[in-house]
Image (cartoon, helix red, strand yellow):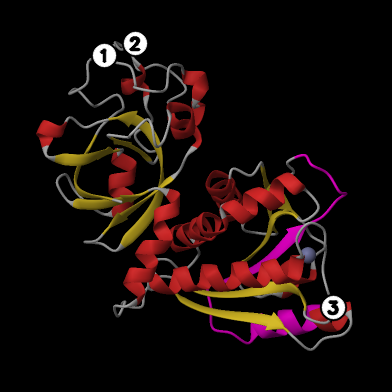
Amino acid sequence: MLTGKCSWFGGPNDTGVAPDEGLAFIDAYSDAPDLFLAQQPPGTTGLARRLNPAKKYIACRWDYDETPKDVLLTMRVLVYAPRTRRLLIARPADWGPHEDTGRIADISPGLMDALGIETDDEVQVMLPGEFAQRSLRERQEPVPVGGAMIAMSSGHGKLIRGASGVIDEVDEARRVVEEVAMQLRALGTTVVTFHDDVSTTQSENLDRIVDWHNSQTRDLDVSVHFNAYEPTNNPMGVECLYVSQDALAAEVSDAISGAGYLKDRGAKYRDDLAFLNGTEAPSILIETCFVDSTADASLYGNYFTQICAAIAATLVDEAPGVA
Ligand SMILES: [Zn+2]
């Protein structure tokens, strides 16, 4: 983890950057179109001035041995601002700032706004694997309660099982729910969790889960499942189902994909699911990955903590009810 001061960079208004200046590991607009403005700003030719200042991006003095350029292109990092206690996900966009500045990171104006900080405020930058250690340490200290209240449950139940393949849906959904809840609590979010240990039929199970959610005081209902299709070695990926929360579902799917290197199948509208239809608060249903894909199961196993951290960070950042 890096800790130190930050400043901002990039975009049409960054006159500290020459009009023709490029970026350290992004060679073309098409390498990361999400980070850039659709048009090159007038009077400029370089990618640094074409960065979209509203996006959440960051430059650090990355160690290319630890995180090679091609990894940086798809990697997400967590950026925490101790002063405002906000945690956000950002994408590496450049190498810098120069050591002489005494700063450890340059971030986008949009990220600076979203973190609620200013130039020379302190940030902590965490690579995906480092997040869990930080939450463990913070768990030792009292954390002020704030942000959204979230109710989370695992899909299916102890006696009415879900999908099974290389991994088991019910077992893994329970692990994800508890790990995400632990990380959310470390960030000061109020979370309640539920796993159905008693239902013996599918309708009883669905009713029990929906009833539990509707009996909670919360801003958001989250259900965790795993997908299944047919046994394969191919990567299948993550998706997030919704009825009204299309933006949040897309963010969650994108975050899980970025943290776990899982294929991003994105947000999917589903009007036929008891959980999404029956829960009265805004809701999403996460299909973490496919239990019958060996590629997915191995990525999920390797990046379990990072995936859970990404879900927690996204919910802290984007859930309804967040001030
Ligand atoms: Zn399921």
The residue carrying mark 1 is 19
The kind of residue on which mark 2 rests is Thr
Q: Is residue 140 magenta?
A: no
Q: Who comes first in sequence, dot 1 or dot 2?
A: 1
Q: Position of residue 253 (x, y in %)?
A: 61, 50
Residue range corresponding to the magenta coloring: 206-234
Residue at x 72% of width, y 64% of height: 225
Q: Position of residue 314 (x, y in %)?
A: 49, 57
The residue carrying mark 3 is 160
User: Which numbered disc, 3 or 2, marks the residue closer to the eye?
Assistant: 3
Residues marked 1 and 2 touching at CB (< 8 Å): yes
Residue at x 74% of width, y 74% of height: 278
The residue carrying mark 2 is 45
86 to the left or right of 271: left
Q: Residue furthest front?
A: 65
Structural distance between the alpha carbons of marks 3 and 2: 60 Å
The kind of residue on which mark 1 rests is Pro
Q: SS of the residue at dot 2?
A: loop
Q: Who comes first in sequence, dot 3 or dot 2?
A: 2
